[in-house]
Amino acid sequence: MNRRDALERVALILGGTVIGGAAFLQGCKNPSEKAAGFSLTQDQIAFLDEVAETIIPTTSTPGAKAALVGAFMNTMVTDCYKEKDQKVFAGGITEIDNAANHMYGKGFMSITPAQRTSLLNQVNKELKAYNDSKKEDDPNHYFGMMKQLTLLGYFSSEIGATQALRYVAIPGKYEGCVPYKKGDKAWA
């Protein structure tokens, strides 16, 4: 199974709840709605790696940065998002960096991991407030897109599927009732 097939299946399993779920099902075929020449720079991709690493840090398993989630986000936003969502997403990078400068006097890439966590927790509160008052025609919030792409990119990567989740490469028979103890990894 290739990565595109896996993403389509994840989108189906989630019921299309991921922003751009329709794009996954259509195979990212929105050429008329893409921004001409949209692409993130290597610095922006590194920035997204650090945001993703703050969301899913390295613990006993590798974090989002090891799974190259920043590059995944770039591909998904470039290939699958509509122009208005691409602009919001790219503007979110600037928003997070400006918030870091305002709170700590330094850019996001220069602050400590604890400060990054604190900052992103604050941005997450803003996301929740935004979603509570969001109208149907309002654009998606940049941090919501970043969080969703972080989770999708990490858990659909080899690292996420084989090290963060339990993984059986070739499953045997179907077992509908498998013993589960608190703290066990979920199945990939």
Image: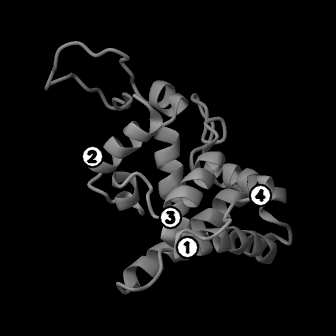
Q: Nearer the viewer, mark 3 or mark 2?
A: 3
Separation (CA) of disc 4 from disc 1: 17 Å
**Residue 41's disc number:** 4
Distance from the alpha carbon under mark 4 to that under mark 2: 32 Å
Identity, as a three-letter code, of the amino acid under mark 2: Ile
First reached walking from the N terminus: tag 2 or tag 1: 2
Q: Secondary structure at mark 4?
A: loop
Q: Residue at x 76, y 75 (%)?
A: 98
Where is mark 3, residue-wise?
31
Query: Is disc 3 placed on a helix, strand or loop?
Result: helix
Nearest the eye: 1 or 181: 1
75 versus 104 height, above or below: above
Instruction: Name the disc covering residue 83, or none.
Output: 1
As measured in the structure, the alpha-carbon distance from the residue carrying label 3 to the one carrying label 4 is 21 Å
> Residue 137 in the image: x percent, y percent?
39, 86
Task: Please report whichever mark, 3 or 4, sits nearer to the chain's N-terminal start.
Answer: 3
